[in-house]
Amino acid sequence: MSDNTYVPPKIWTWDQESGSKFANINRPIAGATHDKDLPRGKHPLQLYSLATPNGVKVTIMLEELLARGISEAEYDAFIINIMEGDQFSSGFVGANPNSKIPALVDYSTETPTRVFESGAILLYLAEKFDAFLPKDHAKRTECLSWLFWQMGSAPLLGGGFGHFYAYAPEKYEYPINRYAMEIKRQLDVLDRQLAENQYISGDEYTIADMAIWPWYGALAANKVYEAGEFLQVQDYKNVQRWTSEINDRKAVKRGKMVNRSWGDPSGQLLERHDASDFETRTQDKLSPES
Ligand SMILES: N[C@@H](CCC(=O)N[C@@H](CS)C(=O)NCC(=O)O)C(=O)O
């Protein structure tokens, strides 16, 4: 147990100097910091995002819809650089008052519809296009239970375990222990579910898989936090089987690339405006404004 203890003052104050990798974008107030409109492309669906696990959920869904032949799901995806504070522009705050990617604006409705929170976006698209959400009531309910499981669970993986294990400026045993325990429990929840089912909510590939895979598939494949050995992720055999099955889907491979600005350049598509963009990468065509 660490002897490095902290006695909170009576009133918390904002110390802008302290903090982790994200200290420069973290602040205790909401709202816009600067005036700037969001760009708009040619399709009815406009996505403002970044290829983090939360962003990838939505680009996977859009690419899956297109792969199913639903051409109305064509979309423009603009990159929001959260490390530069793009999420605090007046335009982005108009699309998501919570200033977090992903945010979607649908211009095909009578007045434009904004949708924020990745789970809400997945559900919106599933209902709009009648896809990847089971029609049978019991199966639909099971799918939504897992979708909401993800929304409640992943913050403990990212904001809890990932933060204290990988990003915090100092390592402390107490939070790392607490969150490692919880994340191993979550992996076991998934492993048991996937022992009985091909996909998360049964025999159909759904928005529940699309929500859970970018976080827990990445963890199982040792793609986040370099925590594979620490958490012994190889032991979760059913999660491993499901992780590689989903990874092999063409739409998933495409979805992972959209709005990605780091890693192997061959895996990056900074902006997406057309299916052909995957063949002819757009990075070099981007204007400095975008
Ligand atoms: N619950 C939200 C979480 C979104 C979220 O945390 N997005 C992060 C990137 S993964 C973000 O935009 N962070 C910027 C910030 O916190 O300022 C969702 O699922 O959409």
Image (cartoon, grey):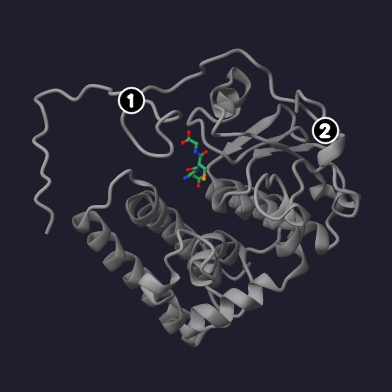
Residue at position x 76%, y 58% in the image: 254
Of the residues shown, which amino acid type is indicated by label 1? Answer: Glu
Residue at position x 54%, y 27% in the image: 85
Residue at position x 72%, y 54% in the image: 257
Task: Characterize the local packing of mark 1: few (<14), some (14-19) or many (20 or more) Cα atoms within 10 angstroms.
Answer: few
Element assignment for label 2: loop
Quarter of the image where the N terminus is located? bottom left
Question: Please, is residue 149 above or below residue 290 in the view?
Answer: below
Query: Mark 2 vs mark 1: which is more N-terminal?
Result: 1
Residue at position x 33%, y 46% in the image: 168
Mark 2 or mark 1, whichever is nearer to me: 1
Of the residues shown, which amino acid type is indicated by label 2? Answer: Leu
Element assignment for label 1: loop
The residue identified by callout 1 is 17
Quarter of the image where the C terminus is located? top right
In this picture, residue 26 sits left or right of residue 116:
left
Q: Which mark is residue 286?
A: 2
Ligand 1 neighbours mark 2 (CB distance < 8 Å): no
- Which quarter of the figure has residue 181? bottom left
How far, Cα to Cα, is label 2 from label 1? Answer: 34 Å
Q: Which mark is residue 49?
A: none
